[in-house]
């Protein structure tokens, strides 16, 4: 036991406690689990509570129609319909300028003509109504002084803990055409022209049936969402279909008097919550509730269906494909990072400039990356990923080659950033953690804390995964198309910015590393001191400029100066050991094989 403790102390004192540099490395390694675990825990703390932050668009193409409405507490007293002229055309604010004009056009033989029948009336029973009003009654605007198109709205809770808080209203037809099934919103609800007229017709004829009526054409609302923005979010988007009950609630408010509407909605909510238990019909109100519940929850195959629900990407909506986008990026990044363990920063072509030397290293790493990507895509096709189709698989291969190039540029620039490559690798690990926690690989960034949403723009995974989603759920479903291609090019542009910045940083760092290779240090003051110590006066005169902080690095004749390198290391040791450790007697270090010698050589300036 005594020998074990003595051996342990020898390892600890030499590998950890012998110098300030080794202590810093030890603490750096010690906090890696903290950085990874705490960052990811906070990044994925409770994202489901923020699902309502998803950008949602209500796109209204419907007109404001003139309606006749007679309300009352008795079932037989209630009538409603959209005004029509003698030719059967619906009257709205586009083809009429006032209520009086609408009444005049819709009055036939002293009765008001509607799509649900002809009724005796008075002017107070005629009003205009837009379906957006039904939605708006249940929404809370963020700003009271802004127009609806410029505002943001919030819904009440659709289910426990779930409310939409980022709803946008669009009524301009050109903007609707631009945004429908686009890249900006996670959920689109399109209200087609004639939607409110059809709703009123169905409600009116549920209550009263007039023989000889011409049926109002069936118009449904369209709800569209996609797996493309974020796979996991796509699954939760299905629950947004429950929002259709709020549409009916808003309609009831407009159809009935306040007290009657309140009673009906209370009972309706109970039946919706317990719809599997059935409904007992006890009177006209219960009969209406039964019909409305069936109306809301009827399937798309039934006559009373209200909303078409379309979710892009459902064909490939399996976890292996969806979450695979994230794991692919992790695999490529780690694969590129691992190259820094088998390759080195050594300069083998001595006459190359720092820029050319750096580019040759980049080319070597990207050559390896091409092989990695190709093997990865082949393996993916064997695991079932080929279900996305040949066009998407080919696009995926090309895209992965591109992002691998960006990863090579990024990791190499960070690898060359510091003199000690282990510190550089530590920085790469931190950047990997940022990408994992804030790169949109699991939940979309708006569902995370604001901090992670902010730093997500610094994550290369964000743009890489967005484009992969467009390939899998766009090209994979519709084939090659300009819309997805332009989006992928947009994400490629964002990544190109990273590439340019990182390549410039890499060239700057490679200039320093090249000076270290040639002279032992990138600091001119240290190199000048070494020249002076070695009595190399001609080199001193050649190297030194009148301005003390500037030196003639590129005018030095030799590709490198071995004696100067040794002198710099002698005068300015990179690892200065503690005095108590220097006094200790040290034995020869025995290594199992050459790989251990290589590891020690790469990580230690002094072998201890």
Image: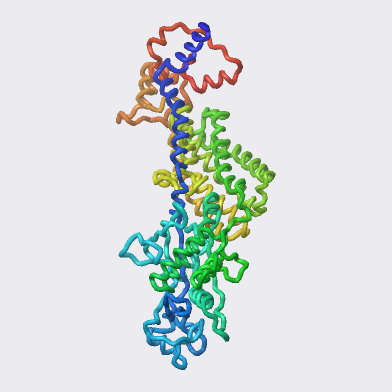
- Asked whether 595 or 10 is in front, the reply is 10
Q: Where residue 92 sits in the image (x, y, percent)?
A: 44, 80
Q: Quadrant of residue 305?
A: bottom right
Question: Above or below — where is 437 with respect to 74?
Answer: above
Residue drawn at point x = 51 percent, y = 72 percent: 283
Question: Above or below — where is 411 with respect to 75?
Answer: above
The colour scheme is: rainbow
Q: Where residue 167 sits in the image (x, y, percent)?
A: 42, 60
Q: Is residue 193 visible?
A: no
Q: Quadrant of residue 127?
A: bottom left
Query: Going by the picture, which residue comes out furthest to the right?
Result: 382
Number of labels in the image equals 0
Residue drawn at point x = 41 percent, y = 25 percent: 521
Q: Where residue 193 sits in the image (x, y, percent)?
A: 50, 74
Residue drawn at point x = 47 percent, y = 30 percent: 33
Q: Is residue 433 visible?
A: yes
- Asked whether 402 or 318 is in front, the reply is 318
Q: Where residue 95 sits in the image (x, y, percent)?
A: 44, 83
Query: Going by the picture, which residue comes out furthest to the bottom?
Result: 109
């Amino acid at each position: 036991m005594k020998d074990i403790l003595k051996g342990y102390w020898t390892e600890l004192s030499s590998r950890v406690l012998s110098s300030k540099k080794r202590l810093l490395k030890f603490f750096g390694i010690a906090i890696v689990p903290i950085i990874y675990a705490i960052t990811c825990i906070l990044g994925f703390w409770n994202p489901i509570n923020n699902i309502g932050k998803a950008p949602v668009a209500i796109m209204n193409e419907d007109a404001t129609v003139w309606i006749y409405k007679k309300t009352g507490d008795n079932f037989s007293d209630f009538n409603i319909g959209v005004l029509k002229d003698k030719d059967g055309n619906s009257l709205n604010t586009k083809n009429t300028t006032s209520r009086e004009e609408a009444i005049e056009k819709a009055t036939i033989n002293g009765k008001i003509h509607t799509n649900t029948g002809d009724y005796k009336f008075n002017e107070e029973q005629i009003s205009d109504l837009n379906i957006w009003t039904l939605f708006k009654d249940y929404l809370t605007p963020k700003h009271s002084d802004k127009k609806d198109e410029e505002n943001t709205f919030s819904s009440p809770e659709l289910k426990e803990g779930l409310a939409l808080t980022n709803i946008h209203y669009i009524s301009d037809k050109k903007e609707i055409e631009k945004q429908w099934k686009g890249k900006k919103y996670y959920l689109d609800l399109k209200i087609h022209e004639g939607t409110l007229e059809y709703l009123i017709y169905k409600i009116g004829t549920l209550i009263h049936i007039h023989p000889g009526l011409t049926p109002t054409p069936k118009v449904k609302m369209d709800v569209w969402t996609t797996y493309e923005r974020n796979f996991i979010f796509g699954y939760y988007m299905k629950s947004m279909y429950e929002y259709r009950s709020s549409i009916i609630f808003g309609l009831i408010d407009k159809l009935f008097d306040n007290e009657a509407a309140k009673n009906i909605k209370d009972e309706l909510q109970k039946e919706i919550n317990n719809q599997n238990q059935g409904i007992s019909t006890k009177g006209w109100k219960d009969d209406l509730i039964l019909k409305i519940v069936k109306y809301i929850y009827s399937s798309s195959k039934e006559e009373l269906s209200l909303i078409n629900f379309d979710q892009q990407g459902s064909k490939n909506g399996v976890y292996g494909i969806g979450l695979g986008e994230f794991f692919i990026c992790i695999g490529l990044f780690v694969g590129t990072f691992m190259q820094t363990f088998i390759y080195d920063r050594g300069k083998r072509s001595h006459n190359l400039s720092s820029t050319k030397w750096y580019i040759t290293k980049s080319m070597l790493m990207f050559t390896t990356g091409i092989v990695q990507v190709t093997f990865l895509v082949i393996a993916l096709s064997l695991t079932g990923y080929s279900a996305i189709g040949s066009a998407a698989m080919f696009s995926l291969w090309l895209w992965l080659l591109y992002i691998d190039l960006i990863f090579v540029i990024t990791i190499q620039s960070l690898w060359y950033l510091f003199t000690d490559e282990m510190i550089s690798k530590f920085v790469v690990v931190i950047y990997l953690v940022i990408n994992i926690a804030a790169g949109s690989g699991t939940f979309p960034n708006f569902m995370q804390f604001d901090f992670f949403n902010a730093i997500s723009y610094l994550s290369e995974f964000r743009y890489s995964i967005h484009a992969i989603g467009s390939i899998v759920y766009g090209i994979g479903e519709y084939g090659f198309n300009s819309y997805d291609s332009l989006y992928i090019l947009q994400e490629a542009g964002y990544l190109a910015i990273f590439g340019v910045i990182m390549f410039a940083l890499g060239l700057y760092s490679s200039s320093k590393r090249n000076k270290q290779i040639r002279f032992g240090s990138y600091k001119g003051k240290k190199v000048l001191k070494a020249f002076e110590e070695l009595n190399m006066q001609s080199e001193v005169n050649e190297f030194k400029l009148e301005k003390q902080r500037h030196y003639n690095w590129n005018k030095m004749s030799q590709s490198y100066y071995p004696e100067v390198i040794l002198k710099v290391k002698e005068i300015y040791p990179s690892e200065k050991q503690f005095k108590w450790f220097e006094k200790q007697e040290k034995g020869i270090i025995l290594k199992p094989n050459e790989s251990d010698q290589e590891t020690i050589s790469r990580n230690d300036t002094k072998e201890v």
